[in-house]
Image (cartoon, coloured by chain):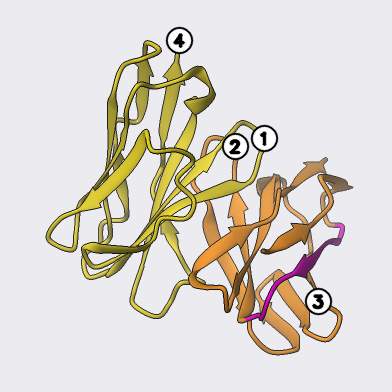
Amino acid sequence: GQSLEQPSEVTAVEGAIVQINCTYQTSGFYGLSWYQQHDGGAPTFLSYNALDGLEETGRFSSFLSRSDSYGYLLLQELQMKDSASYFCAVRDQAAVNKLTFGGGTRVLVKP
Amino acid sequence: GAGVSQSPSNKVTEKGKDVELRCDPISGHTALYWYRQSLGQGLEFLIYFQGNSAPDKSGLPSDRFSAERTGGSVSTLTIQRTQQEDSAVYLCASSPAGRSDEQFFGPGTRLTVL
């Protein structure tokens, strides 16, 4: 089966940088996705990494190291609206059409 | 275009009753997923549809849970003889074929079993 580990909570101030780490164990691996979920809202897709390296999309970047079974989501120039939960998710060879989600990291941005 | 819609948005029921939750995916999305999320927790996979067939039902917690999809579109998740531990937000998502990593989620149905 799969398992994912990510910190439960991170607090930072506006304008700061936050890195949310995600380590995973899977039987085979296709890629690592990141989703954002505001309180009471639906998860929304942020990024997907299938290959090693950094993917940048505006203020958010996502990194993957397949050899280390590790990835992270980098949130830069934090804004109050970035306060949300962030989930990493993996798809693996045992269930190619199924995403397995981590427990989520709650990010609290303070003024 | 329209996103994924779910109904009802909230459902309160008594223990032992049956409930039906509905999901309308994005038009043209062949893949449809159901998840369950308890308060402050991650998403728990329930079932996956490709078209009208469900090749992966591995996440359904018990035989009280069932789901169907008709016309390659609307899906219904049915929970029979509800229990208090079924209380959660039930989320539906859809994606184009071959794009399982980027799923589009509906707003969810909050189920409360008294």
In the image, residue B113 above or below residue A74: above
Tag 3 residue:
A69
Question: Can you tell which of label 3 and label 2 is closer to the viewer?
Answer: 3
Q: What element carries label 4?
A: loop
Q: Chain letter of disc 3?
A: A
In the image, residue B107 above or below residue B56: above
Q: Chain letter of disc 1?
A: B
Left or right, A67 with reference to B63: right
Tag 1 residue:
B40
| Numbered tag placed on residue A39 in the rendering | 2
Residue B62: tell me if it is visible.
yes
Task: Assess disc 2: are there few (<14), some (14-19) or many (≥20) residues with their C-alpha within 10 Å of its C-alpha.
Answer: few
Query: In the image, what residue type sits under mark 1?
Result: Gly
Tag 4 residue:
B114
Q: Is mark 1 on a helix, strand or loop?
A: loop
Left or right, B98 with reference to A70: left
